[in-house]
């Protein structure tokens, strides 16, 4: 990015800036006219100057100009105008004044919008440029750059710069011209008054910027301090576990408190400075009218200045200070923004960025498979203390081959793996594949043909599928239907702001590369890989917990209804009927909560979920009409009594509270107060107490909690109330609840509940496991297993994959590498979360999958190295390469060929 | 049968008889009442110990694996507590429990039980007292056997 903000702005928005300037120029005569009109109205129409010589009419809208003397004098008339009487002239001039007001307003409107758009476009460009630079940070820079600070810079710090860009050239011109026009006008009226105003302006323009220099320094300090503040918060949040482990919360609080004090202190100094400057500025601005009134008035009294002129001068002066003030403000803003811009460009300093050129030469290199001899020559890597990790190491392997990189306990194996995967920049020597230098391969080829799975699986928030296919999205391959006009607009804007023109909605996934026909086929491949890597069970369970959208998968939804019926038949015929109590519109479900029984559906809106239901007026009016409120409140009282009795004495936050109690530990005392009040006031309850009590039985499940609160009569009334609740909700048109329907899928409920369409009994021993078994059998019989697992691919992984276990993350990371079918897979610690047996299995799987491509795997010891084609060892910074005499998978290989490259045979 | 009735049953169990009614209620509330069909196993010998059971209704047999097959060593009826040793000593099941008729039992989860013991010393003392008494009885039986 350019060093100077103004050069950057000029370079990218020259045309727009000039165009807007031109419009500003065009608007000026109109502005001048609107200034001049009040004088004309007073002098000509009201005071009647135009009718001085006894004229009964005066010309209105006469357009013409006087020729100067050297052209022979005289005047040219373009339009003779209308002859109007005195009142007519007054109204005509006044209307003209109004017209100019409107025209000026419209000019201002257009200019403001254009400026805003201009600024936003430049902001977009700048943010994008900065983001592009984020992707270019060198590994060294990444060690020092804090992600949260960078995010703050791109989001917050450039925002005022963007706001300023629209004003960068136009404002000084526009305001400058306004001020000059006003000043010129004053000068025309009275040269002395004009000079006076000019003198005060000159003083303003010299003093104020000087006073503001200190402000800039403070502004810079505050910007850095707030950036570090944001960075610190993110650091604490990321490391919050360590904060708790070491009980450093107080220290961290004090630290943040101190930073806040510093921010406050800087802001206080800024305020002091800022407002004193403002005071002086205002004073100077008001000094001029003082002179006008005093001196101008004196002239007027003396008769050297007519009243109309003075009014016009004062009028014009009223227009002068705002542009001046804004001009001074602009100057302030300019310096301010320049400081910010400098800070931003420092963060993205050139030496922190990798050269841009690497990406350019991409197009030249043909995308050929990475096979042939992989030769490392004289590789030298030193660690941060200057010790040599690799010291002139050389090796040669014919690809494709499966290589075990056996660690000697030091960093050498991992370093070599990173070099081969092109993750390591700073090393001496050369690595070549065939006739190509590995380091000079374009990024596109590397991304397509080399995969690297390190110890730290980095996942992005999104579904498992999104993460798995991350490596297949290198460029858009197909266009999706897009509204032509919208597309043109989008592309035009992108071109104007140096943004990419690719549409994010286009088809980016490279199905062909993985050998898939379409989305479904790709899902099948993903599920298959996950199965093989040992995540079959997890993906199945994720699928059972997933919600299915019947509009998106209508066929599957139908099959699920079929599966639901099949499952019920299974239960009936295998004497398992008592394991699940199905949802029945006419019967109370003992295994479900009272809320679920009343709604007979699944809430989709927040206001119908959990305890919120008791607050919901529609729901309350429905149970009021069903005459259930009193019963439910009575049940609430009983629950509150039991809970306060049995959970008393448990410390707050005890896990039993969270697991079993209807009442949170912090609410226990509230309910005790309600109970006492109830006892004292002979059963009368306040409204809010009733609502709170009402919320308790909503979560009550008769079979589970066994407080004997429900009898058959009450149950039948609850079933009866279902209809009223539903009617009430239907009438008000609230889509807050999705009701159960035996013939349809409930999109709000997880797949598991949809299949069961009922609740597993709490009463029967081991019911859950048996039901799960039966369900798995039905899913398998109906051939739905793959569909369920496909739904499992929709499972969200959370921020940095935190919703997955370490093993699941590692598995997803591996499959992400496998699915793009690299020529060359480098595994460096990716199997660490697995125990030895699993990691052995996975190694075998990888060896099996990579019969025709190359596998580079870092192993902690040579126990698992046997089946690899080539074994690499490290000694004294040197690499020793052993070609396996007899790869386990190809036992029939003659020994004599041991030294020969395996490549030919495997490929 | 309700929570109250379960508390009454728990009260009949020697190990729990001296515990506060409110604590017994908590124990009952945090337990699950489950039904076993005749012939269904509570658990099998060698299983991981995850819960103790109090039989509320019905009967169950205690079975031991021997080289000659399973043999019945005892019969349990109402208010019997089984499986508590396994969860206290964290060892696998030492015997198989099988319901001989439709049986209802209160399933006390291991984790919940241990947490209750950790939280309420009175409960721990009651359990210790019961265990000590059992040890005493065993000693007495050993003495009786050796002297006979």
Image (cartoon, coloured by chain):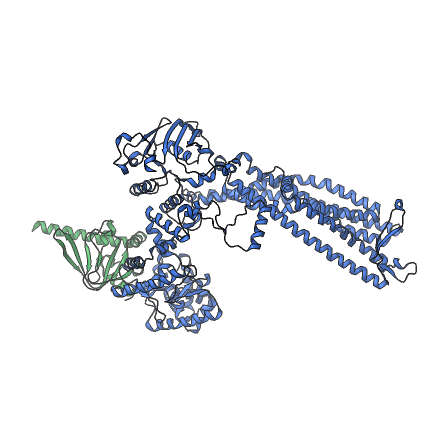
Give the residue at x 81% y 59%.
A93
Q: Does A470 appear above or below A730?
A: above
Q: Percent position (x, y) of residue A879?
A: 36, 28
The reply, left or right, for residue B88 in relation to residue A604 is: left
Q: Does A196 appear above or below A878?
A: below
Taking the view exactly as shown, the residue that stands out farthest to the right is: A53
Residue situated in front as seen by the camera: A827 or A144: A827
Q: Which chain is displayed in blue in the rendered image? A: A
Q: Does B112 appear above or below B38?
A: above
Residue situated in front as seen by the camera: A905 or A469: A905
Q: Percent position (x, y) of residue A54?
A: 92, 61
Count the marks: 0
Q: Does A334 appear above or below A407?
A: below
Residue situated in front as seen by the camera: A9 or A344: A9
Taking the view exactly as shown, the residue that stands out farthest to the left is: B148
The reply, left or right, for residue A175 in relation to residue A819 is: right
Q: In the rendered image, which quarter contains the C terminus of chain A?
A: top left
For chain B, the rendered hue is green
**Does residue A97 appear anywhere in the picture?**
yes
Q: In the rendered image, which quarter contains the N terminus of chain A?
A: top right
The reply, left or right, for residue A622 in relation to residue B10 is: right
Q: Percent position (x, y) of residue A272?
A: 65, 44
The reply, left or right, for residue A724 in relation to residue A107 is: left
Q: Percent position (x, y) of residue A73?
A: 89, 48
**Does residue A276 appear anywhere in the picture?**
no
């Amino acid at each position: 990015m350019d060093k100077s903000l103004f050069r950057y702005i000029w370079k990218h928005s020259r045309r727009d800036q000039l165009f807007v300037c031109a419009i500003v120029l065009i608007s000026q005569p109109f502005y001048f006219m609107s200034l001049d009109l009040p004088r004309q109205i007073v002098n000509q129409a009201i005071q009647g100057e135009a009718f001085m010589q006894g004229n009964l009419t005066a010309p209105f809208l006469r357009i013409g100009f006087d020729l100067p003397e050297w052209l022979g004098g005289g005047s040219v008339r373009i339009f003779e105008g209308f002859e109007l009487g005195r009142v007519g002239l007054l109204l005509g001039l006044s209307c003209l004044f109004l017209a100019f007001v409107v025209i000026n307003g419209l000019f201002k409107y257009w200019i403001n919008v254009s400026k805003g758009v201009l600024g936003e476009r430049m902001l977009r460009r700048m943010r994008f440029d900065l983001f592009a630079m984020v992707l270019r940070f060198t590994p060294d820079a990444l060690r020092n750059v804090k992600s949260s600070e960078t995010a703050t810079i791109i989001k917050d710090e450039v925002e005022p710069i963007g706001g300023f860009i629209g004003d960068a050239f136009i404002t000084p011109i526009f305001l400058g011209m306004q001020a000059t026009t006003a000043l010129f006008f004053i000068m025309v009226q009275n040269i002395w008054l004009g000079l006076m105003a000019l003198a005060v302006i000159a003083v303003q323009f010299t003093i104020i910027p000087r006073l503001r220099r200190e402000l800039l320094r403070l502004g810079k300090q505050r910007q850095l301090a707030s950036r570090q503040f944001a960075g610190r918060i993110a650091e604490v949040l990321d490391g919050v576990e360590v904060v708790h482990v070491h009980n450093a919360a107080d220290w961290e609080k004090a630290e943040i408190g101190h930073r806040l004090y510093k921010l406050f202190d800087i802001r206080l100094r800024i305020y002091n400075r800022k407002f004193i400057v403002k005071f002086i500025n205002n004073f100077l601005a008001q000094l001029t009218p003082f002179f006008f009134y005093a001196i101008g008035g004196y002239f007027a009294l003396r008769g050297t200045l007519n009243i109309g002129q003075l009014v016009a001068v004062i009028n014009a002066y009223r227009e002068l200070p705002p542009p001046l003030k804004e001009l001074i403000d602009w100057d302030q803003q300019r310096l301010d923004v320049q400081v910010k811009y400098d800070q931003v460009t420092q963060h993205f300093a050139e030496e922190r960025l990798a050269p841009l050129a690497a990406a350019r030469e991409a197009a030249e290199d043909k995308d050929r498979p990475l096979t042939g001899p992989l030769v490392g020559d004289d590789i030298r890597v030193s660690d941060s203390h200057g010790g040599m990790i690799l010291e002139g190491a050389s090796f040669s392997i014919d690809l494709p081959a499966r290589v075990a990189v056996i660690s000697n306990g030091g960093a050498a194996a991992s370093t070599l793996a990173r070099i081969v995967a092109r993750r390591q920049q700073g090393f001496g020597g050369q690595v070549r594949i065939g006739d190509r230098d590995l380091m000079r391969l374009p990024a596109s080829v590397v991304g397509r043909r080399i995969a690297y799975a390190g110890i730290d699986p980095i996942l992005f928030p999104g579904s498992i599928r999104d993460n798995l296919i991350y490596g297949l999205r290198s460029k858009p391959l197909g266009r999706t239907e897009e509204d032509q006009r919208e597309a043109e607009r989008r592309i035009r804007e992108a071109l104007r702001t140096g943004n990419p023109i690719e549409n994010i909605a286009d088809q980016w996934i490279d199905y062909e590369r993985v050998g898939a026909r379409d989305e479904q086929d790709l899902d099948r491949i993903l599920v298959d890989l996950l199965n093989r890597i040992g995540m079959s069970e997890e993906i199945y369970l994720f699928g059972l917990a997933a919600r299915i959208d019947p509009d998106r998968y209508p066929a599957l939804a139908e099959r699920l209804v079929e599966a639901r019926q099949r499952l019920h038949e299974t239960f009936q015929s295998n004497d398992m009927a008592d394991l699940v109590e199905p949802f029945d519109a006419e019967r109370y479900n003992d295994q479900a909560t009272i809320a679920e029984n009343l709604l007979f559906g699944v809430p989709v809106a927040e206001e119908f979920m959990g305890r919120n239901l008791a607050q919901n007026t529609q729901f309350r009016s429905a149970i009021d009409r069903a005459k259930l409120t009193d019963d439910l409140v009575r049940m609430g009282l009983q629950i509150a009594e039991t809970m306060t009795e049995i959970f008393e004495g448990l410390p707050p936050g005890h896990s039993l509270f969270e697991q079993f109690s209807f009442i949170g530990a912090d609410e226990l005392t509230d309910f005790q107060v309600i109970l006492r009040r109830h006892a004292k006031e002979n059963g009368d309850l306040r409204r809010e107490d009733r609502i709170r009590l009402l919320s308790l039985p909503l979560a009550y499940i008769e079979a589970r909690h066994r407080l004997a609160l429900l009898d058959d009569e009450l149950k039948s009334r609850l079933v009866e109330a279902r209809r009223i609740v539903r009617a009430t909700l239907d009438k008000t048109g609230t889509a807050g609840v999705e009701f159960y329907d035996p013939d349809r899928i409930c999109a709000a409920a997880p797949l598991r509940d949809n299949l069961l369409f009922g609740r597993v009994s709490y009463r029967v021993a081991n019911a859950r496991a048996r039901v799960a078994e039966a369900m798995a059998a039905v899913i398998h019989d109906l051939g739905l297993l793959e569909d369920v697992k496909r739904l499992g691919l929709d499972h969200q992984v959370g921020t940095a994959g935190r919703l997955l276990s370490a093993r699941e993350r590692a598995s997803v990371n591996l499959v992400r590498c496998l699915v793009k079918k690299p020529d060359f897979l480098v595994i460096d610690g990716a199997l660490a979360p697995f125990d030895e047996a699993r990691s052995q299995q996975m190694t075998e799987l990888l060896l099996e999958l990579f019969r025709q491509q190359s596998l580079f795997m870092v192993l902690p010891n040579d126990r698992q190295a046997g089946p690899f084609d080539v074994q690499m060892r490290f000694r004294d910074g040197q690499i020793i390469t052993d070609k396996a005499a007899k790869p386990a998978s190809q036992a029939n290989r003659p020994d004599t060929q041991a030294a020969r490259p395996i490549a030919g045979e495997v490929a | 049968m309700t929570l109250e009735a379960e508390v009454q049953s728990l009260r009949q169990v020697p190990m729990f008889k001296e515990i506060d009614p409110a604590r017994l209620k908590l124990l009952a509330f945090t337990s699950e009442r489950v039904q076993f069909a005749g012939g269904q196993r509570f658990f099998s010998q060698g299983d991981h110990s995850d819960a103790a059971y109090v039989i509320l209704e019905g009967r169950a047999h205690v079975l031991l694996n021997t080289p000659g097959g399973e043999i019945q060593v005892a019969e349990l009826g109402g208010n019997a507590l089984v499986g508590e040793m396994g969860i206290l000593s964290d060892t696998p099941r030492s015997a198989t429990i099988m319901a001989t008729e439709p049986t209802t039992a209160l399933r006390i989860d291991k984790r919940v039980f241990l947490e209750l013991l950790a939280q309420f010393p009175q409960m721990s003392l009651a359990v210790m007292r019961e265990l000590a008494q059992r040890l005493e009885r065993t000693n007495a039986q050993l003495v009786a056997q050796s002297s006979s």
